[in-house]
């Protein structure tokens, strides 16, 4: 009898749920059908520099090439919570070490950096290797491929929840798969309260890709990107 009631209860629950909408999942080089494509291989029109002037990165052969001096680029789109996919191709810079190898970064809300660095046989501090929430949380493992190979990030980001008066309602969190391997697992964003205070309650922001050239001694670098898309989580 108990099992029967449990089964009936489960059936009622199943009936009561709305039917999920259909999404074509896409595949290699094709975004899911409900994604916003931020770089499709053809142009960088979804991006600007931080001051709003045209982006310094260029589209070439289906890739985005960001060379030292191009400046950080920022998505025109602002978002709160997202699923993000991005592929990057660190250059071979065998004469460099640590942070001076191919270095960029994916800044969620323009603030929280998921580090991009050639981290293959390249020791540096733990919160500065690829897959780190920079300065805060090392990746769970180092899933680097050698330089001059495409690598991927799949990120689920929930921004800090801010109240209208700028107080924090809930910390942001980030989950990151690096080349398909889990490296951040619902990691809290410790700067969340500050972000709410600074933004006076605004809880959206852009995606930003770092030009590392502003850092002392940084050598000339070209970081390549492709297949950048996001799905807003509502
Ligand atoms: Mg960086």
Image: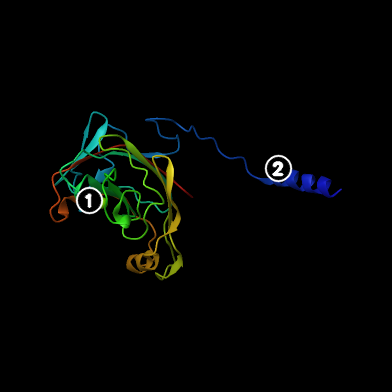
Between 9 and 138, the residue placed more toward the observer is 138
Secondary element at tag 2 = helix
What is the spatial separation of the Cα atoms under label 1 and label 2, in whole angstroms? 55 Å
Mark 1 or mark 2: which comes first in sequence?
A: 2
- Callout 1: CB less than 8 Å from ligand 1: no
Rendering coords of residue 35 (x, y %): 42, 39
| Residue 142 rendering spot, x and y as whole percentages | 36, 47
Asked whether mark 2 lies closer than 8 Å to ligand 1, one says no
Residue 154 point in image, percent of width and height: 40, 43
Q: Is residue 28 above or below residue 155?
A: above
Could you tell me residue 206's position as x and y percent? 32, 52
Residue 5 visible (yes or no): yes
Q: Quadrant of residue 60?
A: top left
**For the residue carrying disc 2, how many other residues have a C-alpha within 10 Å: few (<14), some (14-19), or many (20+)?**
few
Q: Nearer the viewer, residue 80 or 86?
A: 86
Q: Which residue is denoted by mark 1 in the rendering?
A: 98
Residue with the most extreme right position: 1
Q: Is residue 209 left or right of residue 34?
A: left
**Which type of secondary structure does the marked residue at label 1 adopt?**
helix
Residue with the mark numbered 2:
15
The image shows residue 175, relative to residue 23, as above or below, that is: below
Q: Residue at x 27, y 30 (%)?
A: 62
Can residue 227 be seen in this snapshot? no
The nearer-to-camera label among 1 and 2 is: 1
Left/right placement of residue 214 relative to residue 232 reads: left
The residue closer to the viewer here, 191 or 46, is: 191
Q: Residues within 10 Å of mark 1 (few under 14, many from 20)?
A: some
Q: How many marks?
A: 2
Mark on residue 126? none
Q: Residue at x 70, y 42 (%)?
A: 15
């Amino acid at each position: 009898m108990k099992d029967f009631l449990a089964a009936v209860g489960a059936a009622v629950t199943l009936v009561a749920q709305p039917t999920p909408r259909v999404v074509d999942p896409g595949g290699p080089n094709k975004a899911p059908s409900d994604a916003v494509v931020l770089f499709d291989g053809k142009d960088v029109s979804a991006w600007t520099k931080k001051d709003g002037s045209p982006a310094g990165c260029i589209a070439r052969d289906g890739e985005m090439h960001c060379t030292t001096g191009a400046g950080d680029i920022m998505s025109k789109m602002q978002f709160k919570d997202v699923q993000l996919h991005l592929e990057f191709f660190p250059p071979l810079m065998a004469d460099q070490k640590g942070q001076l190898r191919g270095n960029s970064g994916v800044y969620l809300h323009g603030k929280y950096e998921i580090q991009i660095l050639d981290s293959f046989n390249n020791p540096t501090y733990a919160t500065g290797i690829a897959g780190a929430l920079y300065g805060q949380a090392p990746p769970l493992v180092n899933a680097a491929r050698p330089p001059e190979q495409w690598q991927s990030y799949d990120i689920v980001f929930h921004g800090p929840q801010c109240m209208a008066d700028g107080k924090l309602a809930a910390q942001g969190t980030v989950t990151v798969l690096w080349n398909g391997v889990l490296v951040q697992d619902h990691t809290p964003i410790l700067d969340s309260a500050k972000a709410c205070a600074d933004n006076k309650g605004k809880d959206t922001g852009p995606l930003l890709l770092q030009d590392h050239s502003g850092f002392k001694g940084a050598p000339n670098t070209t970081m390549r990107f492709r297949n950048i898309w996001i799905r807003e989580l509502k």
